[in-house]
Amino acid sequence: MTVSSFPRTVEWVGGIDGFVRMIDQTRLPHELVMLECRDTKAVWEAIKRLSVRGAPAIGIAGAMGAALGILNHAASDRASLLEELDRVCDYLVGSRPTAVNLAWALERMKACARNSHEAEVSRLKESLLAEAIRIRDEDAEMCRAIGQFGEPLITEGCRVLTHCNAGSLATAEFGTALAPFYVAHQRGRRFKVYADETRPLLQGARLTAWELQQAGIDVTVLCDNMAGALMQNGGVDLVITGADRIAANGDVANKIGTYSVAVIAQAHRIPFYVAAPSSTFDLSLPDGSGIPIEHRDADEVRSCLGHPIAPAGVECYCPAFDVTPARLIRGIITERGVISPLGTEVIARLLGEKSST
Amino acid sequence: MTVSSFPRTVEWVGGIDGFVRMIDQTRLPHELVMLECRDTKAVWEAIKRLSVRGAPAIGIAGAMGAALGILNHAASDRASLLEELDRVCDYLVGSRPTAVNLAWALERMKACARNSHEAEVSRLKESLLAEAIRIRDEDAEMCRAIGQFGEPLITEGCRVLTHCNAGSLATAEFGTALAPFYVAHQRGRRFKVYADETRPLLQGARLTAWELQQAGIDVTVLCDNMAGALMQNGGVDLVITGADRIAANGDVANKIGTYSVAVIAQAHRIPFYVAAPSSTFDLSLPDGSGIPIEHRDADEVRSCLGHPIAPAGVECYCPAFDVTPARLIRGIITERGVISPLGTEVIARLLGEKSST
C-alpha cells in the first residue's frame, strides 16, 4: 500500500546490481524529476543539496548509499569489505552532519555487517542491501501505523491545519503528520487540509501542498500569519504537526512557527496534535527547556527561495525550531498508539512497555 | 523636523510651475529611486503600480496629482477650471478605487475650489496647490503628534515588535505605528525594533526594515511565524501596529497577521498597542464584526515577489486584513492622546470632545 499517485520518495531499483532512485525535491513543486544515483558520491551529493530531506528519508538514502558503495566495491574478503563500509559510512555522514537519522541508519548498516558473521563477500553484500531496504520498509510500516492510529481524528468534513512538511516526502511514504490524512483518504473520508506555507524555506507551500495535491486530497495553502484569522473565523477543527524532538514530559520541538499555531489553537479551543514515531522521544530531557534550538543563516530570512526581500545586511532572527509546551498539546500520535493526555508517566509507560516486548 | 536620512515620501518641488516627487517604493529595499511626476497621468500611474502606497501617502499623492492637472490646464475662467478639476479627480480616484484616503483628499480639493470664491484663475490655481501641500503638512503634523503621545512607551533598552509598514513610507513622514520610534530616536533613546516580514507582500521586510535602517534605528527582521518563539523567549516588551479601520468599541482591522500577534502577545502578557489617527475610527460600526475583509488574489500567496512558490493552481486562502478584538489591545495611540483602556464610551468621548472644539 503506497501513495499510488507519485513515486516513492527514495527506493532501491533492481537487485544486487541495482541503484537508488529518489524524487529530486529541489525541483518541486514545479516539476517531478527522478534522480538516479548509481554510486555513493551521487547519494552524498543528493543529500547535501537537499534533493532528499526529512530525517527518515535522509536515513534511508544514506543506508542505500552505503549499500551502493559496498556493492560497487571489488573486495575479495570480509575484512576489506568491512573496512570499505566504515570508509563509505564516514564519508556519507558528512553530507549532513547534524542529521541524527543519517548517523543512526549508517550505524545500523555497520552493525548489520558486524553481526552477520557471513564470511562470503557476495552473501555479505546481499545482507547489507537487504538491511538498507529493510530500513526503508520499517519506516513505511511505522508511518502507516501512525496513520492508522491518527485516522479516527479525521472525521467526515473536518478542516485540519498542518505546518511544514511531515509527509511522504520526508519519510519512506505516508509521513507522520500527514499519515492520518492518507489513511482517511484511502478509506473514502472527505476533509480539507490547510497547509501553512512555512517560511523561511516554504516546505508547506512547496512540499505538503504538492504531495497532497498529487494524492487528490483537498489542500489549501495559506501564509503562516493567516492561520489565526482562519481559526478566528471558525475554519479549523483540528491541527496536526510533526515533531523533531520530544522531551520526557511531552514538550515538542518542531519547525519554527509550530508554537504560534499551538498558542492560537488553544485560544480557540481547537485540538492540537503532534504525530511522530516513538524514536523522536528523548527521555534524557525532562522537559523542552533542554532541547538545543539551531539558529540558521540570516540569509534564509533575508531572502525567499534565493531572491532578496529585505535590505542588504539587515539583521535577522532565524531560529529553525521552537518548543511547544505539553500543556498546549492534546495528544501525540505514535506508531504504538495515541498518548493523551500527556504526562511524563504515561509517556514513559507507553515507550517502556512496548520497547521491552 | 523630518526623518532626515531619506527624502520625503511624497512632496511638491518648486512653486506654481513645480512637480511631484516621490520615493518609488516598488524599487525598495534594493535601491532608492525618486520618481518625478510632471502631469496627472504620471501620478495616476505611480499610484496604480504601487510606487506610492499607504492610505495617507496615496491621499497626498492624489491631491498633488489633482493640483498638477489644474496648474497645467489652460482654463480662462473659473467655471472651466472647476470642470477640469472634477474631470481630473474622477480620473485619479480610479487609480485605486477602494482607497478611502484618496477619495477623501480629492473631495477636499474640490471643496477647496468651491469654497474659495476666487474668480481669478491664477489665484484659484494657487489656492489648490496650497491645499494639496496643506494636506501633506497636516498629515505630517498628525503623525508627529501620534509619535509624541506614543514615545513614552519606548523606554530605554526596550524591544518592540511591529507588523507590516505603518511608517514614513505610508504617510507624509514618521508614520503611525513607527512614529513613536522616530520621536524616541530623536530624543536619543536606545531600543530595538523587530519587524515581522509580513507575507504575502512583505511590507515589513521591504519597507519597515528599510526606513528604520535608513534612520539609524536598530531593526531586526523575522518571519511572521517567528514572533511567537521570540515572545516565548522573553525577547519582546511591547507591540505597536497600525490600523486600517477601528470600530466604535476599539476592535481593530489591520494587515493580516495582526490578530495572531495580538493573541500570542496576550498569552505572554506583552502590552499590545495600536497607533492610528482619529480619522481611522468608524463610529458607524459598533464592533469589528461589521468591518468588511477584502480577500486578495490567490497568486499573492502562491508566489513571493512574483516567483511561484506553490504548485500551480493550488487553492489559497488570502485575506488582506484581520480583526483584533479590543480586549487584546492595551491602548490606541491617536494624535489626540492615548485611549487606554478601550471602551465605546471613552472612545466616543475622546473623538467627540476634540472634534467639537
Image: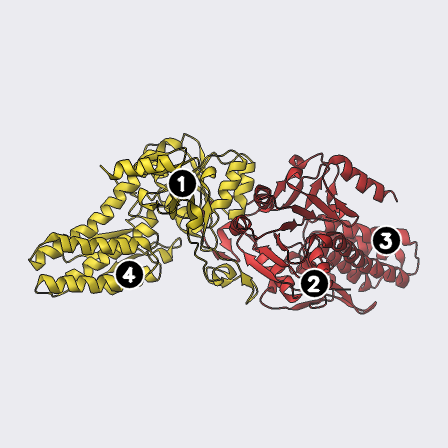
Chain colours: A red, B yellow
Say which of A80 and A100 sits in front. A100
Q: Earlier in the sequence, mark 2 or mark 3?
A: 2
Q: Which residue in the structure is indicated by mark 4?
A: B93
Say which of A342 and A294 sits in front. A342
User: What residue type is disc 1 on?
Assistant: Asn
Image spot of residue B58 (x, y percent): 30, 54
Contact, mark 4 vs mark 3 (Cβ under 8 Å): no
Q: Which residue in the structure is indicated by mark 3?
A: A112
User: What residue type is disc 2 on?
Assistant: Ala
User: What residue type is disc 3 on?
Assistant: Cys
Q: Which residue in the structure is indicated by mark 2?
A: A42
Image spot of residue B244 (x, y percent): 38, 48
Contact, mark 3 vs mark 1 (Cβ under 8 Å): no
Q: Is residue B23 above or below residue B356?
A: below
Q: Nearer the viewer, mark 2 or mark 3?
A: 3
Image spot of residue A100 (x, y percent): 72, 48
User: What residue type is disc 4 on?
Assistant: Val
Label 3 crowd (10 A; few <14 / some 14-19 / many >=20): some
Q: Quadrant of residue B137?
A: top left
**Residue found 35% across the figure and 44% down from its top:** B283
Q: Quadrant of residue B345?
A: top left
Kindly state the secondary structure of the residue where label 1 is placed. Answer: loop
Q: Chain for mark 4?
A: B
Q: Is residue A130 above or below residue B242?
A: below
Judge from the rendering whether residue A53 lies leftward or rightward of residue B27; answer left or right. right
Q: Which residue in the structure is indicated by mark 1?
A: B249
Q: CA distance from mark 2 to mark 3?
A: 23 Å
Q: Nearer the viewer, mark 1 or mark 2?
A: 1
Say which of A258 and B91 sits in front. B91
Labels 3 and 1 in the same subunit: no
Label 4 crowd (10 A; few <14 / some 14-19 / many >=20): many
